[in-house]
C-alpha cells in the first residue's frame, strides 16, 4: 500500500506531485535540492479523506520535513528534506495505489537506490587475501619530490565516502585529490592491467602548514553539491573546498577571547553534516554548516572538562549515534561528548588519532612517540579491551590507522615502512594483547597514512617524514594504491 520514490536533483528547486485521478486526491511534496544524500524519500502512505467533499477539493497533505544542512558556494545553496513519513494506521485498504501517478519536474533524475543507504556505494563487505603480498596498482611520486623550500612529504590519506577519490595533504601546503582508476570499478583487475603513475586530478593550496582535513560525510560524485571537504591550516580559518572545481565555498572563522581569528588544530563534520566541530587549545568550537562565519558554541575545558587540557589533536563522530563525539589531546587524554561532557580517560602519551568501530561500541586510540595502540570499551568507558602489539610509532609524526568496513581487521602504518594487520576477536573473551596477523613492507620510508576502501579490496598508503640527516635515511615521499585480493 505504499510506493518508494527516489529523487536526486542537482538544481535549486524541484517538486514532486502525486495525483490520484479517480479520487482526485492530490499530494504535493516540495523538495529543495534533496541530492545531498542520494535522497531516498521514506515510504509515503497516502490517506483517504473521511468525506467525499474533502476528496473533491484536492486537499493538500501537510508533511513535516527534517532538513539536512545547506552547503553554500558562490552560486548555489543546497539543502535537503529528509525522512518524510505519514502515519500508516489510517490508510484505507480500498485506496488503489496503483493508479497514483508520479509527475516529476523537468531535469529530475530517478535512481534505484536503497532507501537506507547514505550514498550509492555498495555496503556489502569485500574480501581480503592476507596470505599473499598485495599487488601495486599505481603510485604517485613525482609530485612529492623535495624542494629547497620544503621536504614535501605526505601527511596521511583518506578515501571519500563514496570511494571514488583519495584526499592527500602534504608538506608543501597543498591538498591533492586522486581519482580511483575506472578500470577497478568492476571489482576485478583486468588481465591487461599494468601499474601506472597516479596523477592528481585536483590540487588545492592552503595558506600555511596543513593541520587537518575531512570529507563531507554524504559525499557522492553523482551529485556535485555534496563533493566538498574541510581543511584547516596554520594562521588561517577553516575552509570548505569544492572537490570538483577546487574553489573555496565557505570560510568558518573561530575567534578567541580577545576577538582574534585563531587556527583550528583538528576539524570534523558532526550531526549528519549539520555542524562542524573544531579543536583548539583547551576548547572545542561548533559551527553551523549552513552559516559560515563565527562559531555558535564554545566548549571550554576548564569549565566542562576539568581534567582535560591541551591542544585537541583529533576528533571523530560515532557512526551509529550522530552527535556522540570522541576527541584526543596532546596532553594525554581522551574525551567523550554528546550535548554535554560524558567522560575522560588518560593515555600514555599525546593522542594522535581516535576511531570508532563500525558497530559504535569500541574506540581505538593511538599516541605519538609510543607504540601504544589500544581499544576501549564504550559500554564501560575507560575500560581497556585489548592492546595491539608490534606497531612501530616512535615518532612525533601522526601514524595513521584504519578499520575495515566489517570491523574485523585493523590496519596501521609504521616508521619501519610496513603496514601491519590485526584480526579482531568475535567472542567476548578478549585478550589483553593482540599480535599482528600479518605485515607487508610497502615503503623504504615511514608509512604515515593508511586508508581502507569501503567497497573494494584496495588500501591506500602514503609515506614520508621530515628527515634531518639525508645521508642515513632513504627518502620515499609517495602515495600508493594496493590490491589485497
Image: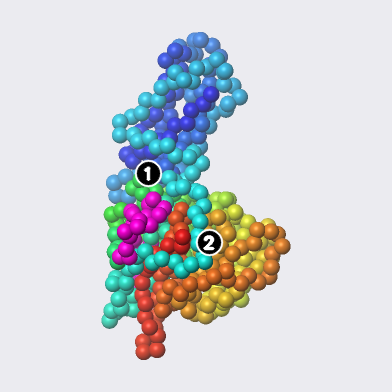
With respect to residue 190, does 279 lie above or below?
Answer: below
Q: Is residue 276 visible?
A: no
Alpha carbons under labels 2 and 1: distance apart:
32 Å
> Residue at 72% of width from left, 62% of height from top?
429
User: In which image quadrant can residue 19 be found?
Assistant: top left
Q: Position of residue 355 (x, y in %)?
A: 54, 62
- In this view of the protein, which residue sits in the foreground, 440 or 84? 440
Callout 2 secondary element? strand
Q: Which mark is residue 193?
A: none
Pointer 2 with pointer 1, Cβ within 8 A: no
Residue 273 forms part of the magenta stretch: no
Q: Is residue 38 left or right of residue 362?
A: left
Q: Which residue lies under the disc numbered 2?
A: 403
- In this view of the protein, which residue sits in the foreground, 479 or 82? 479
Magenta span of residues: 167-196
> Residue at 55% of width from left, 50% of height from top?
322
Amino acid at each position: 500500500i505504499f510506493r518508494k520514490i527516489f529523487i536526486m536533483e542537482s538544481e535549486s528547486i524541484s517538486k514532486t506531485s502525486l495525483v490520484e485521478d479517480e479520487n482526485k486526491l492530490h499530494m504535493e511534496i516540495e523538495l529543495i535540492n534533496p541530492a545531498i544524500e542520494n535522497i531516498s524519500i521514506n515510504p509515503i502512505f497516502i490517506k483517504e479523506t473521511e468525506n467525499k467533499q474533502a476528496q473533491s477539493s484536492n486537499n493538500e497533505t501537510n508533511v513535516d520535513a527534517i532538513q539536512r544542512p545547506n552547503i553554500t558556494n558562490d552560486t548555489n545553496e543546497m539543502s535537503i528534506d529528509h525522512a518524510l513519513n505519514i502515519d500508516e494506521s489510517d490508510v484505507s485498504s480500498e485506496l488503489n495505489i496503483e493508479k497514483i501517478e508520479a509527475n516529476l519536474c523537468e531535469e529530475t533524475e530517478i535512481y534505484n537506490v536503497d532507501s537506507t543507504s547514505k550514498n550509492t556505494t555498495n555496503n556489502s563487505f569485500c574480501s581480503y587475501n592476507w596470505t599473499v603480498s598485495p599487488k601495486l596498482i599505481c603510485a604517485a611520486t613525482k609530485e612529492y619530490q623535495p624542494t629547497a623550500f620544503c621536504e614535501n612529504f605526505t601527511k596521511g590519506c583518506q578515501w571519500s565516502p563514496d570511494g571514488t577519490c583519495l584526499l592527500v595533504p602534504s608538506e608543501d601546503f597543498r591538498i591533492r585529490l586522486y581519482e580511483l582508476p575506472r578500470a577497478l570499478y568492476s571489482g576485478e583487475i583486468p588481465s591487461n592491467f599494468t601499474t601506472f603513475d597516479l596523477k592528481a586530478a585536483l590540487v588545492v593550496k592552503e595558506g600555511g602548514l596543513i593541520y587537518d582535513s575531512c570529507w563531507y560525510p554524504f559525499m557522492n560524485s553523482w551529485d556535485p553539491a555534496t563533493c566538498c571537504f574541510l581543511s584547516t591550516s596554520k594562521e588561517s580559518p577553516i575552509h570548505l573546498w569544492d572537490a570538483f572545481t577546487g574553489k573555496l565555498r565557505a570560510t568558518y572563522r573561530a575567534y578567541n577571547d580577545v576577538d582574534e581569528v585563531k587556527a583550528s588544530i583538528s576539524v570534523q563534520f558532526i550531526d549528519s553534516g549539520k555542524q562542524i566541530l573544531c579543536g583548539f587549545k583547551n576548547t572545542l568550537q561548533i559551527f553551523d554548516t549552513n552559516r559560515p562565519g563565527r562559531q555558535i558554541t564554545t566548549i571550554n575545558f576548564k569549565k566542562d572538562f576539568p581534567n582535560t587540557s591541551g591542544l585537541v589533536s583529533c576528533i571523530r563522530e560515532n557512526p551509529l549515534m550522530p552527535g556522540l563525539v570522541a576527541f584526543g589531546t596532546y596532553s594525554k587524554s581522551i574525551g567523550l561528548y554528546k550535548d554535554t561532557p560524558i567522560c575522560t580517560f588518560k593515555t600514555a602519551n599525546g593522542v594522535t588519532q581516535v576511531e570508532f568501530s563500525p558497530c559504535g561500541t569500541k574506540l581505538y586510540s593511538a599516541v605519538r612517540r609510543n607504540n601504544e595502540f589500544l581499544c576501549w570499551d564504550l559500554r564501560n568507558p575507560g575500560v581497556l579491551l585489548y592492546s595491539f602489539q608490534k606497531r612501530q610509532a616512535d615518532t612525533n609524526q601522526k601514524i595513521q590507522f584504519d578499520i575495515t568496513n566489517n570491523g574485523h581487521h585493523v590496519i596501521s602504518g609504521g616508521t619501519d615502512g610496513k603496514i601491519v594487520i590485526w584480526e579482531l576477536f568475535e567472542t567476548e573473551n578478549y585478550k589483553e594483547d593482540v599480535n599482528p596477523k600479518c605485515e607487508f613492507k610497502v615503503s623504504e620510508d615511514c608509512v604515515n597514512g593508511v586508508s581502507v576502501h569501503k567497497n573494494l579490496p584496495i588500501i591506500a598508503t602514503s609515506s614520508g617524514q621530515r628527515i634531518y640527516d639525508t645521508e642515513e635515511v632513504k627518502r620515499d615521499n609517495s602515495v600508493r594504491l594496493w590490491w589485497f585480493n
